[in-house]
């Protein structure tokens, strides 16, 4: 190979910052899905990402941390809009349907992969907060809009009341290992959430 040919090819660009972290987490997710949590190793993830174990350890000192961060990245890349139908009930039903698709997809994909048995084992229940974060943020937006329209007295609600619909949805998916049905989603909204939101305080 001539000097000109080497120059044309150029050196491999070194990844840094967000680009490097994204590549590492993509590799961790691929390894998690391919081999399962128990068999997943830093060496295998580093090989997939074409880097060293030290690079991974500096960012995620435990395999549990690394796997949780990989799941969080996958969740963050799934499109997830905030509904605006003009009705609190319809907004929440639409939001739950979107969350249902996301959570069920992740839960089913990982159900047989989170097979760790030691103290550092990672479970779907451990990932509930990670998966629910975007949903809960959007719920605040829906509640604020509903309060402005006069549908509810206030959006300043206890965290457990505000998040109860997503907590119930999460438990439903964890218990059944499938997406909730439309009827189950409507029950969560009509029988639990709306009565709580409209109860005198």
Image: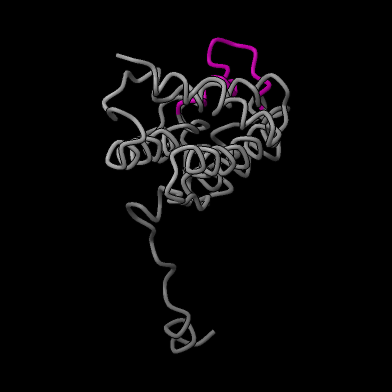
Colour setup of the view: one colour
For the stretch drawn in magenta, what is the main secondary structure?
loop
Q: Which quadrant is home to the N terminus?
A: bottom right
Quadrant assignment, res 60: top left
Report the residue at 57% width, 46% height from top: 47
Q: Nearer the viewer, residue 143 or 201?
A: 201
In the image, residue 23 sits, relative to residue 32, either above or below, namely below
On the image, the x and y values in percent for residue 78 come to: 53, 50
- Res 158 visible: yes
- In the rendered view, tell whether residue 39 sits above or below residue 116: below
* Callout count: 0
Q: Nearer the viewer, residue 43 or 89?
A: 89
Along the viewing direction, whichever of 104 and 182 lies nearer the viewer: 182
Q: Quadrant of residue 133?
A: top left
Q: Is residue 34 magenta?
A: no
Which part of the image, by quadrant, shows the C terminus?
A: top left
Position of 115 with respect to 191 (left or right) is right
Horizontal side of residue 121 vs 160, given as left or right:
right
Whole-percent x, y for residue 119 in the image: 54, 10
Q: Is residue 22 visible?
A: no
Using the rendered view, name the quadrant where residue 28 is placed.
Answer: top right
Task: Pick the residue in front: 109 or 54.
Answer: 109
Residue 194 percent coordinates (x, y): 47, 26
Which residue occupies 65% across, 35% down? 104
Provide the residue span drawn in magenta. 114-129
x and y percentages locating residue 150 in the rendered image? 31, 37
- The residue at 62%/31% (across/down) is 185
Residue 178 higher or lower than 174, as above or below: below
């Amino acid at each position: 190979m001539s000097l000109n040919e080497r120059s044309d090819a150029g050196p491999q660009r070194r990844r840094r910052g967000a680009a490097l972290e994204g590549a590492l987490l993509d590799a961790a997710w691929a390894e998690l899905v391919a081999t399962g949590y128990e068999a997943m190793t830093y060496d295998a993830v580093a090989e997939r990402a074409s880097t060293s174990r030290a690079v991974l350890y500096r960012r995620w000192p435990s395999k549990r941390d690394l796997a949780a961060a990989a799941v969080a990245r996958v969740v963050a890349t799934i499109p997830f809009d905030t509904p605006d139908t003009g009705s609190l009930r319809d907004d929440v039903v639409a939001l739950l349907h979107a969350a249902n698709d996301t959570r069920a997809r992740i839960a089913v994909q990982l159900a047989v992969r989170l097979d760790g048995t030691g103290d550092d084992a990672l479970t779907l229940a451990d990932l509930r907060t990670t998966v629910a974060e975007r949903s809960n943020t959007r719920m605040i937006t829906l509640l604020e809009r509903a309060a402005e329209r006069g549908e509810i007295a206030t959006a300043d609600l206890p965290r457990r009341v505000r998040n109860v619909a997503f907590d119930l949805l999460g438990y439903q998916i964890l218990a059944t290992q499938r997406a909730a049905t439309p009827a189950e989603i409507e029950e969560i909204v009509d029988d639990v959430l709306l009565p709580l939101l409209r109860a005198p305080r």
